[in-house]
């Protein structure tokens, strides 16, 4: 025991040294397992922040050999490696704590790119760091930091796979708009010696295409385009449906410089088929690319106007995306490596199912064919309110006059006036109402077309012959808002959920004596659309109003509720008078059309202060089809609107 004391004494002075060493080992162990202030986490965080912002000056970099790499060079390479994705920096988050072995730390980073169409691509990538002599953690810069499949000089490239565009379907579920063969007529400038002669020959050939395939072609700028084009380029002149091209192929096939590449476009059965309502599908235009750079790229097909424009996203689906790697080639080109690092499959578009009936639409288009003035024809099935046809004559591209016109209804509104008077008990079909040439109302003179007069005749005759003075005389009995009330019962001014824009009308109310008289004959401040009048006419035929239906899928979420039942006795009387319009009145040209009896009302509507300036109307029904015809500045309805109605009814399939 005594000898042991000196040993303990000799060891005791060395205890602090051993304790310090032990503490050092513990501290070192803590740095490996925990997030210390001088650990790699700070360098990782600084790198991720700089990657997003493009400013990496707060981060130290070395290459795998240990040589220093300037931060600016890393920023440049990051952008180059990102390639097509460089415009939208990725979201970056550390995935867990770095693992440290000796002086090397490996951090896992979650990288999430937002690709076009809001497609998200996420993956983890390793970021290695080295603990340097200056006691700092430096990022080891290598392309695998961006993605493990990248090598020096590579870049990420985006490839899009267009989704199949869905069609617009008719009520039977058959596609209205579908891929159809087309021929693009083009010209190689270098092969044309006599440009004026070529233009004349092309123009004559295009004009020889028979309706309804006749294309609207303006060749006025073709000489300039040929002069300014690269001699080896193909200058496109027009795209023709294949059947239109076949009509004139012998006339244009051998013309100097002409070429005829073929393809397919999403088209309706004819060029005019419900054109404004359906819209068109065309290659993406500059405005499309500018407005939606994240949605469209050059070459995409885009819906413009009508249903194609409003439901473009639904119809076009979601393009498929692939991210691949590329390597530099010669003269600044790139070569695919064959490595695909991400793919999302295209999602086909969803179709639109409409209530349109192909046969009825063809009849409506045929009825307006050759019409020189802006015009429209709408047909609605009485039994359920389905819109069967919406045709528009000449006018600005995409203008759906059938649904959106805001014009006075003229004497077609006598249908509403007569119903109001019948409801109020002010008249019966047989009561005699005088029809003079003119009638003065509070200093304003009202007159009949061509100054006709009937004398004292039954109200049915006043209605059938469209006597303005009789209705102006009866106007005070309508009351200050009687027309507006009846108009609303017939769906006018209502809020419709149709799936497309439609004007439901505005009816005059609470005007003075002259305004009331004007409103009684469809003038004054009352304005409507052809669709609104077709729906009101269907309401009379049906006995109550229902909102027109156009889209079955997707069905509108908030259609207007059905209107109340109309008074049966008033409806019966009005039907008798509307039948008289055809049998003995202004619509007598319709008396001989095939099918069942036709009911209707003509209308001539002044649209300014010149009585000679008038729109022409006809509204009516036959069987289960109600319709409205409108011709802007059409003059007399018997000369323009009624013949269109006759052509429409004759063109309908056997009923």
Image (cartoon, rainbow, N blue to C red):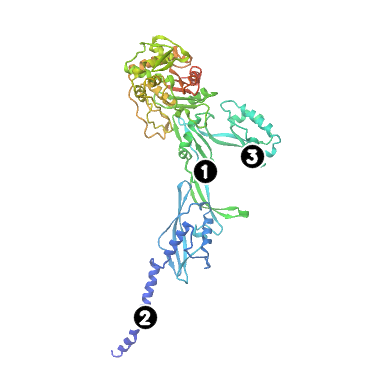
> Farthest front residue?
443
Tell me, yes or no, if residue 357 can be seen here.
no
Q: Nearer the viewer, mark 3 or mark 1?
A: 1
Precedes in sequence: disc 3 or disc 2: 2
User: On the picture, is 391 further left or further right than 249?
Assistant: left
| Percent position of residue 105, x then y | 45, 66
Say which quarter of the image contains residue 627: top left
Is residue 87 placed above or below 359 in the rendered structure?
Answer: below
Tell me, yes or no, if residue 287 can be seen here.
yes
Say few, some or many: other residues with alpha carbon within 10 Å of mark 2 (under 14 / 14 to 19 / 20 or more). few
Precedes in sequence: disc 2 or disc 1: 2
| Percent position of residue 101, x then y | 44, 68
| Percent position of residue 478, x then y | 34, 19
Say which quarter of the image contains residue 1: bottom left
Say which quarter of the image contains residue 137: bottom left
Mark 1, secondary structure of its residue: helix
Report if the CB atoms under discs 3 and 1 are less than 8 Å apart. no
Q: Nearer the viewer, mark 3 or mark 2?
A: 3
- Which residue is under mark 3? 234
Q: Nearer the viewer, mark 2 or mark 1?
A: 1
Is residue 632 placed above or below 51 in the rendered structure?
Answer: above
Tell me, for residue 289, which label it has, or none. Answer: 1
Tell me, for residue 17, which label it has, or none. Answer: 2
Mark 3, secondary structure of its residue: loop
Say few, some or many: other residues with alpha carbon within 10 Å of mark 1 (under 14 / 14 to 19 / 20 or more). some
Mark 2, secondary structure of its residue: helix
Q: Nearer the viewer, residue 473 or 97?
A: 473
């Amino acid at each position: 025991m005594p000898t042991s004391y000196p040993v303990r004494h000799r060891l005791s002075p060395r205890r602090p040294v051993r304790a310090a060493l032990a503490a050092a080992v513990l501290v070192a162990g803590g740095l490996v397992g925990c997030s210390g202030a001088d650990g790699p986490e700070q360098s990782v965080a600084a790198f991720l922040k700089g990657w997003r912002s493009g400013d990496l000056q707060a981060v130290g970099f070395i290459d795998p050999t240990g040589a220093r790499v300037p931060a600016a060079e890393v920023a440049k390479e990051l952008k180059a490696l990102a390639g097509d994705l460089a415009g939208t920096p990725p979201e970056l988050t550390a995935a867990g704590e770095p693992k440290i072995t000796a002086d090397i730390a490996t951090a896992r980073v979650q990288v999430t790119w937002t690709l076009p169409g809001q497609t998200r691509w996420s993956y983890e990538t390793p970021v290695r760091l080295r603990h340097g002599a200056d006691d700092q953690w430096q990022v080891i810069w290598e392309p695998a930091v961006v993605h493990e499949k990248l090598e020096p000089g590579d870049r990420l490239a985006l490839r899009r796979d267009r989704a199949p565009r869905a069609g617009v379907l008719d009520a039977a579920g058959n596609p209205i708009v579908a891929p159809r063969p087309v021929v693009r007529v083009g010209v190689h400038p270098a092969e044309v010696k006599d440009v004026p002669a070529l233009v004349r020959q092309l123009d004559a050939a295009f004009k020889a295409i028979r309706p309804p395939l006749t294309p609207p072609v303006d060749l006025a700028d073709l000489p300039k385009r040929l002069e300014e084009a690269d001699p080896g380029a193909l200058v496109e002149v027009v795209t023709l449906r294949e059947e239109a091209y076949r009509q004139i192929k012998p006339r244009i096939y051998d013309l100097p410089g002409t070429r005829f590449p073929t393809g397919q476009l999403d088209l309706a059965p004819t060029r005019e088929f419900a054109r404004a309502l359906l819209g068109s599908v065309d290659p993406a235009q500059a405005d499309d690319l500018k407005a939606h750079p994240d949605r469209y790229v050059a070459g995409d097909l885009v819906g413009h106007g009508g249903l194609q424009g409003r439901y473009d996203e639904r119809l076009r689906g979601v393009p498929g995306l692939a991210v691949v790697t590329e390597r530099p080639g010669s003269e600044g080109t790139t070569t695919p490596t064959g490595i695909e690092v991400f793919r999302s499959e295209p999602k086909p578009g969803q179709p639109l199912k409409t209530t349109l009936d192909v046969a009825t639409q063809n009849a409506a288009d045929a009825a307006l064919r050759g019409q020189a003035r802006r015009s429209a024809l709408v047909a609605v099935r009485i039994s359920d309110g389905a819109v069967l046809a919406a045709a528009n004559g000449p006018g600005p591209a995409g203008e759906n006059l059938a649904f959106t016109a805001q014009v006075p209804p003229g004497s077609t509104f006598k249908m509403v006036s007569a119903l109001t008077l019948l409801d109020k008990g002010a008249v019966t079909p047989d009561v005699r109402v005088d029809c003079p040439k003119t009638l003065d109302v509070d200093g304003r003179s009202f007159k009949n077309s061509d100054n006709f007069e009937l004398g004292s005749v039954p109200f049915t005759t006043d209605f059938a012959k469209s006597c303005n003075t009789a209705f102006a005389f009866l106007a005070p009995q309508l009351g200050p808002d009687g027309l507006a009330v009846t108009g609303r019962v017939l769906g006018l001014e209502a809020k419709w959920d149709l799936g497309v824009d439609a004007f439901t009308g505005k009816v005059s109310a609470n005007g003075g004596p002259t305004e009331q008289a004007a409103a009684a004959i469809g003038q004054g401040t009352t304005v409507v659309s052809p669709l609104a009048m077709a729906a009101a006419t269907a309401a009379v035929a049906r006995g109550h109003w229902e909102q027109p239906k156009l889209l079955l899928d997707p069905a509108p979420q908030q259609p207007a509720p059905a209107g109340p039942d109309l008074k049966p006795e008033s409806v019966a009387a009005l039907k008798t008078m509307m039948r008289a319009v055809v049998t003995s009145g202004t619509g007598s040209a319709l008396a001989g059309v095939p099918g069942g009896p036709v009911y209707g009302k003509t209308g001539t509507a002044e649209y300014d202060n010149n009585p000679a300036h008038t729109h022409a109307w006809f509204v009516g029904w036959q069987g289960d089809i109600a319709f409205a015809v409108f011709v802007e500045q059409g003059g007399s309805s018997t000369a323009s609107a009624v013949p269109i109605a006759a052509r429409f009814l004759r063109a309908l399939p056997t009923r």
